[in-house]
Amino acid sequence: MHYTKPIPVPNHGTQSFWDGCRQHQLKFQQCVECVTVNWPPSYLCSHCLSVRFDWIVSKGVGKIYTYVTYYRAFHSSFKDDLPYISAVVELDEGPRILTNIVNCSLSEVECEMRVIVEWDDITSEYSLPKFRPLLSG
Ligand SMILES: [Zn+2]
């Protein structure tokens, strides 16, 4: 099936992130000089301007920090998904990632809900990290 939505456009600072996604690894940068977690990925540290990073693989678990339900498509290619949820998920390691909540009814979603990454393989080169409820027990 042909993917009709916008596709990520990696750059010098984000290529490693998207490479990780393709392997179903959610990665974020940690500065080698000052250990600041750098998110979103960039070519230099937002705290000390170092260009040296380690890439940390997240466990892919966190909680919904905030979210919004879209009932209107602001890009025509998302029309068939309505209504859908865009959320900011705070990973257990700290970074907050903009994503979608999937495999969950709209009425179940709430702030602080525990979620886990689920991969949406949109093309052979790109996988998007989305999140679904983390069922306890
Ligand atoms: Zn730094």
Image (spheres, rainbow, N blue to C red):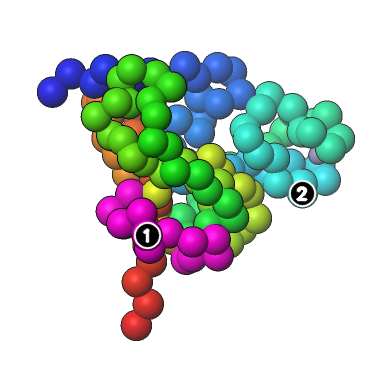
When the figure is inspected, residue 32 is found, relative to residue 90, above or below; the finding is above
Nearer-the-camera pick, 12 or 121: 121
Q: Is residue 129 left or right of residue 50?
A: left
Name the residue at 58% across, 51% down.
66
Q: Quadrant of the N terminus?
A: top left
When the figure is inspected, residue 105 is found, relative to residue 18, above or below; the finding is below
- Label 2 sits on a secondary structure element that is loop
Q: Is residue 83 visible?
A: yes
User: Residue 77: where, in percent of width, then height?
Assistant: 30, 20
Q: Which residue is mark 2?
A: 35
User: Residue 89: where, in percent of width, then height?
Assistant: 54, 51
Is the CB–ligand 1 distance for label 2 below 8 Å? yes
Q: In the rendered structure, which amino acid carries the disc numbered 2?
A: Val
| Disc 2 crowd, CA 10 A, few/some/many (<14, 14-19, 20+) | some
Q: Which residue is mark 1?
A: 107
Specify which label sits upstream in the sequence, 2 or 1.
2
